[in-house]
């Protein structure tokens, strides 16, 4: 439940408002008059403020504007008072509600505030240098596709698991298109409640619904002559899918509460981590909308299918950390092998999080294997991929710790230990190469060797890759 600030100089009235909020299980803080700003500053993490408009609202609203400029505010009109004209106090006045506070009115206001907060977070976010890096064949193919489609106005549908870089792809398309000097407007269709999404996308007129105290542009309008990025399109309700389809077909839309058509000169880029084919089969995604969006599909492969990109991605992430003045870090070769051997279920986002974390732990130092999270260290030892560890350790069935011993015929003369160990070493190297289809880097990781060491051994023992 989100935290709400109630500002009212009349203690009795304020208690009444707080009671409603507490009944809805929202934590409440309160303030009187111009102290509101300080309370908001101290509390932090507020979702919205309710300020009673009994003529004394100017001081608290101004103090809020100063202390918490993005905090959405609703004015509350006591019974018998005229509805206040929303003046420009420099604050985010989102609407007016009547007292006594009614449940459904408040819930609508709260939703509006949450979407406002999401929007300001998005705007405030640093648009990081969106360089799409990667040298693997799968990512080179993605780059080729971006190049092919960018200059056209075709709709693009970007598919891929969470954290694979779908938004990076969308931004690169925009950046390489003739619309690059115009806005790129992202909207996460999954994060905004379906009732609010329509006004978020298309805007609304003053008075279109409770709380709409002024007209507001939607994202399609903001993206005029630029691109709109409809993220998590697979989470859009059927109702909104119909509305969107109409816009794509007719290239016009109306603000909520208006019948004036506006032209949508907007390039549409959509993305989802969902399987839309399954959505269509299950009846949660419209087939006609799918075909409209899927004019040019781009699939972003998961990181585990392109481990070769891991070192350059790490380099890029470190470059960003340096650029933002948040320090620097280097990665030891052993730690790099370890990071390259992990399967990264959270893809590049997870990789970025891990690199940021170790950069905090080893500022300006060199990251060693032991600085890496345990699951990554374990994965590098082969525990991550049961298929691989089965294949390289078939003989470890004697239930003891450590490698199993091959049976040795001691005979009379015993064995030459050194020669014997060399034989075991060669056999294990051959097994590791077999298990990794001859990819030396991965085989080295399985054996806990540096790549160069393994290459040296292959040369010395004249072992051919399979
Ligand atoms: N090829 C790449 N080059 C550089 N940075 C990348 C690349 N791919 C992903 N990233 C970085 O990884 C993080 C996740 O990327 P992004 O937000 O584009 O993923 P996503 O597919 O949209 O994920 P989600 O489905 O979780 O929204 C971002 O910090 C992004 O900058
Ligand atoms: Mg995304």
Image (cartoon, rainbow, N blue to C red):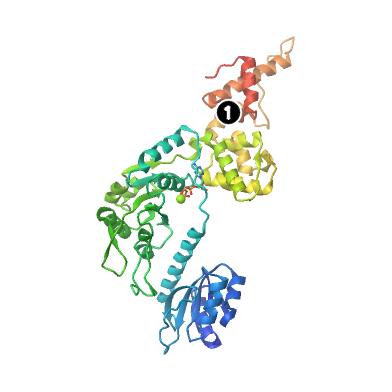
- Measured along the vertical axis of the image, is residue 205 above or below residue 9? above
- The image quadrant that residue 427 belongs to is top right
Residue farthest along the bottom direction in this orientation: 80
The reply, left or right, for residue 131 in relation to residue 216 is right
Residue 78 x, y percent position in the rendering: 45, 86
> Which residue is disc 1 drawn over?
441
- The residue lying toward the viewer, choosing from 400 and 162, is 162
Helix, strand or loop at label 1? It is helix
The reply, left or right, for residue 187 in relation to residue 453 is left
- Measured along the vertical axis of the image, is residue 401 above or below residue 169? above
- The residue lying toward the viewer, choosing from 157 and 409, is 157
Residue farthest along the right direction in this orientation: 413
Number of marks: 1
Residue 191 x, y percent position in the rendering: 43, 59
Residue ID at (54%, 35%): 385
Q: Is residue 364 visible?
A: yes
Q: Residues within 10 Å of mark 1 (few under 14, many from 20)?
A: many
The reply, left or right, for residue 191 in relation to residue 151 is right
Residue ID at (58%, 80%): 34
- Measured along the vertical axis of the image, is residue 431 above or below residue 274? above
Residue ID at (43%, 46%): 175
Residue 310 x, y percent position in the rendering: 55, 37
Residue 325 x, y percent position in the rendering: 63, 50
Asked whether mark 1 and ligand 1 are closer than 8 Å, the reply comes as: no
Q: Is residue 396 visible?
A: no
- The residue lying toward the viewer, choosing from 21 and 291, is 291
């Amino acid at each position: 439940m989100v935290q709400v600030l109630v500002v009212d100089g009349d203690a009795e009235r304020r208690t009444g408002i707080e009671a409603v909020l507490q009944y809805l299980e929202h934590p409440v803080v309160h303030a009187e008059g111009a102290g509101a700003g300080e309370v908001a500053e101290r509390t932090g993490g507020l979702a919205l403020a309710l300020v009673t408009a009994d003529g004394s609202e100017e001081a608290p609203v101004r103090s809020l504007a100063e202390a918490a400029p993005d905090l959405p505010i609703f004015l509350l009109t006591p019974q018998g008072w005229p509805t206040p004209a929303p003046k420009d106090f420099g604050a985010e006045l989102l609407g007016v509600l009547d007292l006594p506070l009614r449940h459904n009115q408040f819930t609508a206001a709260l939703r509006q505030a949450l979407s406002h907060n999401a929007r300001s977070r998005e705007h405030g976010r640093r648009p990081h240098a969106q360089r799409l890096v990667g040298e693997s064949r799968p990512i080179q193919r993605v780059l080729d596709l971006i190049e092919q489609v960018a200059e056209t106005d075709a709709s693009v549908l970007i598919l891929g698991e969470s954290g694979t870089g779908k938004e990076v792809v969308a931004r690169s398309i925009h950046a390489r298109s003739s619309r690059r000097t115009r806005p790129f407007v992202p909207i996460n269709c999954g994060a905004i409640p379906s009732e609010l999404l329509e006004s978020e996308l298309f805007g609304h007129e003053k008075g279109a619904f409770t709380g709409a105290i002024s007209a507001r542009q939607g994202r399609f309008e903001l993206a005029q002559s630029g691109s709109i990025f409809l993220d998590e399109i697979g989470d859009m309700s059927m109702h909104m899918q119909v509305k969107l389809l109409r816009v794509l077909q007719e290239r016009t839309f109306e603000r909520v509460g208006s019948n004036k058509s506006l032209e949508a000169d907007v390039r549409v880029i959509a993305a989802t981590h969902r399987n839309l084919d399954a959505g269509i089969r299950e009846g949660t995604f419209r087939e006609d909308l799918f075909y409209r969006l899927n004019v040019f599909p781009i699939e972003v492969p998961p990181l585990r299918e392109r481990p070769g990109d891991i070192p350059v991605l790490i380099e890029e992430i470190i470059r960003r950390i340096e650029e933002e003045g948040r320090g620097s870090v280097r990665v030891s070769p052993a730690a790099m092998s370890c990071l390259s051997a992990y399967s990264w279920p959270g893809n590049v986002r997870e990789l970025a999080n891990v690199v940021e974390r170790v950069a905090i732990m080893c500022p300006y130092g060199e990251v060693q294997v032991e600085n890496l999270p345990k699951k990554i260290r374990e994965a590098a030892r082969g525990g991550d991929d049961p298929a691989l560890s089965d294949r390289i350790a078939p003989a470890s069935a004697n239930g003891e710790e450590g490698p199993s011993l091959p049976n040795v015929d001691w005979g009379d003369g015993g064995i030459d230990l050194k020669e014997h160990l060399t034989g075991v070493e060669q056999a294990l190297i051959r097994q590791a190469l077999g298990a990794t289809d001859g990819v030396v880097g991965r085989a080295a990781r399985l054996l806990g060797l540096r790549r160069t060491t393994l290459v040296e051994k292959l040369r010395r023992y004249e072992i051919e890759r399979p």
